Image: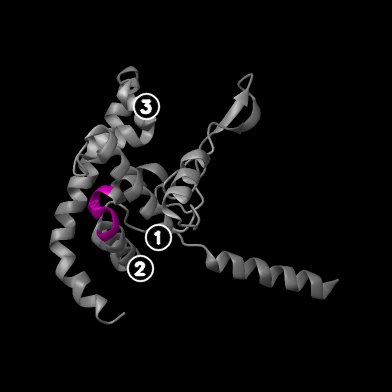
Amino acid sequence: MHRRFLALLITLALLAGCSTTPPREQSNICSIYRQYPDWYEDSLEMEKTWGLPPHVAMAIIKQESSFVEDALPPRDYLLWVIPWGRVSSAYGYAQAQDPVWGEYKDGTGNGGSRDNFDDAIMFVGWYTTGTQRQLGISKWDTYNQYLAYHEGRGGFSRQSYRQKPWLMQVARKVEQQAKDYNWQLKQCRAELESSRSWW
């Protein structure tokens, strides 16, 4: 019995070691990429594949999950007190819901997982590319891209966000974060690029 307990503790410790903690300084993209150099590589790969600027993708992910790999949406309640599942099937860094994650996997042939950063940022690139194609929203237009990301393209077309002043405020916050990230990235890109040669 003692050995089983010890084995369980070791297993739990190993599993805990596999998880990625959120970045310490989430408001600074240079600090994020210094802490997680692989995320910089993933961002560049996403930009090369989908053409979405990394600062836009990172601002969306920050808003959606605060860079928590296994983030879940709030609980739903029956009669305001009894926990009754989640408000949606959103999960992971990008808060992708089950149906659209399935579309992404089917459309790209990519497997992956919503709690892997590289898969999540690729999803954001794929989704915003579809939004540009269907709705004509520039990939540099963080405000409208975020509204379409949150409401879905159909909801954006119906302007459902106009009934949600709080959401328009959030979209402005994401837009400002993307601007900040873009400015910051210009300051540290040379440093990040020089570090790549050592990886």
Q: What element carries label 3?
A: helix
Q: What element carries label 1?
A: helix
Q: Are marks 1 and 3 in contact (CB under 8 Å)?
A: no
Residue 77 vertical placement versus 23 (above, below): above
Q: In this orientation, which residue lies closer to the viewer: 9 or 133? A: 133
Q: Give the range drawn in magenta.
A: 48-56
As drawn, the label of residue 154 is 3
Find residue 186 and report its image quarter.
Answer: bottom left
At 37% from the left and 25% from the top, the residue drawn is 155
Q: Are marks 2 and 1 in contact (CB under 8 Å)?
A: yes
Can you give x and y, in whole percent of width and height, for residue 152 in the image? Answer: 38, 32
* Disc nearer the start of the sequence (2/1): 2
> How many other residues sit within 10 Å of disc 3, few (<14), some (14-19) or many (≥20)?
few
Mark 3 vs mark 2, foreground winner is 3
| In-image side of 52 versus 127 (left or right) | left
Main SS, magenta residues: helix
At 35% from the left and 44% from the top, the residue drawn is 127
Please state which amino acid type lies under the numbered disc 2.
Asp
Question: Marks 3 and 2, Cα distance to the nearest angstrom?
Answer: 34 Å
At 30% from the left and 60% from the top, the residue drawn is 43
| In-image side of 64 versus 133 (left or right) | right
Q: Can you identify the residue that label 1 sits on? A: 118
Mark 1 vs mark 3, foreground winner is 3
Can you give x and y, in whole percent of width and height, for residue 94 in the image? Answer: 41, 47
As drawn, the label of residue 151 is none
Please state which amino acid type lies under the numbered disc 1.
Asp
Q: Are marks 3 and 2 in contact (CB under 8 Å)?
A: no
Q: Is the N terminus in the top left, top right, bottom left or bottom right quadrant?
A: bottom right
Can you give x and y, in whole percent of width and height, for residue 55 in the image? Answer: 24, 52
As drawn, the label of residue 38 is 2
